[in-house]
Amino acid sequence: MSQYTPETTGEQVAADCQAQIKNKTVLITGASPGGLGANFAKVIAKHEPASILLATRDLNKAEITAKEISELSQVRAAADEINSLNEKIDVIVNNAGIMAPAHSKTVDGIESQFGTNHIGPFLFTNLLLSKQLGVSSSGKLRIVNISSNGYRLSPIRFEDWNFDDGKTYNRWAAYGQSKTANMLFSRSLAQKLGNRGVTSVSVHPGISQTPLSKDLKMEDFMEIGPIDRAQGHASHWGHNVQYKTPSQAVATHVFAAFHPSLDAPEHNGAYVAESKPQSDTTVHCWGRDAIDAERLWALSEGIIGQKFDY
């Protein structure tokens, strides 16, 4: 279906989607300088969006911020601030995240990767949806959750999602769980809100050098191999890794946020990589299971203490 390749750049996809970008209001979390969110914003800014709203963790780096996407009180404050602007948002890109730190917990007591990569965006998005449903300028709303093929490292650990308060913590299993959560969140949004004009997909942007991995050493990455081998994966980290340039790394961001082919109902909830929706036959079952998606939604509501019924 797609004419794009792993070498396709964000600029190439944006040129193809310029009609879809023009006059759209786009909200991006995690747009810190040098990261994928900032590069994505620069690429689409050339094609006349109505506005680009940036939400980063640093108040000095953007106009509108969630000071810490993992801190639920700050997430609520940021959502209130954005909702107060009365902007009609057409695209939400949940790009903020962390990768494989040593064990820590958010101020709300949540394992840091699950809290930052999933629970914060889950709350943030739903708080925005309470106002945005039915009022986006195009009559549609697209929600993009940046995941990773690292989802393969772990399903949702429903019985031990918080890693027994750190006692069972593995940095890569925790990362994998959080990326699986991004995929299942998109599936749930598609299932619950597809008939109300919402399209949601998850994205694997590929491997590139960004601030996300700045604190990780080579030996940290080598810990991925045993997990992959234990899962029976044909390949694991360190074998045939192909790094993308900054421009190539945001091509799938642009595709997921704007390409009209994703308006097709059969692609709602898809996992998107290399600027194309991936067949369910290539996606591990835990990244696409409807029952697990519903269980995760309920778990997330329980953690934040708020229900979102659509």
Image: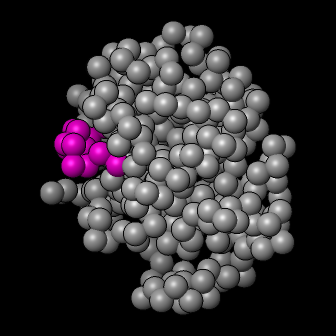
- Horizontally, residue 213 falls left or right of residue 103, namely left
Q: In the image, what residue occupies the spot 38% across and 38% down?
A: 192
Vertically, is 98 above or below 238?
Answer: above
User: Exactly how many numbered labels are in the figure?
Assistant: 0
Inspect the magenta stretch and tell me whether residue 156 lies in it. no
Give the quadrant of residue 144. Answer: top left
Image position, residue 152 (x, y; %): 50, 72
Residue 226 in view here: yes
Image position, residue 198 (x, y; %): 34, 32
- For this rendering, which residue is in front, 203 or 109? 109
Inspect the magenta stretch and tell me whether residue 261 lies in it. yes
Image position, residue 117 (x, y; %): 62, 50
Q: In the image, what residue occupies the spot 49% across and 31% down?
A: 309
Vertically, is 174 above or below 294?
Answer: below
Looking at the magenta stretch, what is its main secondary structure?
helix
Residue 239 in view here: no
* Display coloring: one colour
Give the quadrant of residue 303. Answer: top right
- Horizontally, residue 68 falls left or right of residue 224, namely right
**What range of the chain is rendered magenta?**
258-269
Q: In the image, what residue occupies the spot 51% across and 9% down?
A: 86
- Horizontally, residue 307 falls left or right of residue 47, namely right
Image position, residue 161 (x, y; %): 68, 61
Q: In the image, what residue occupies the spot 69% across and 31% down?
A: 75
Screen quadrant of the C terminus = top left
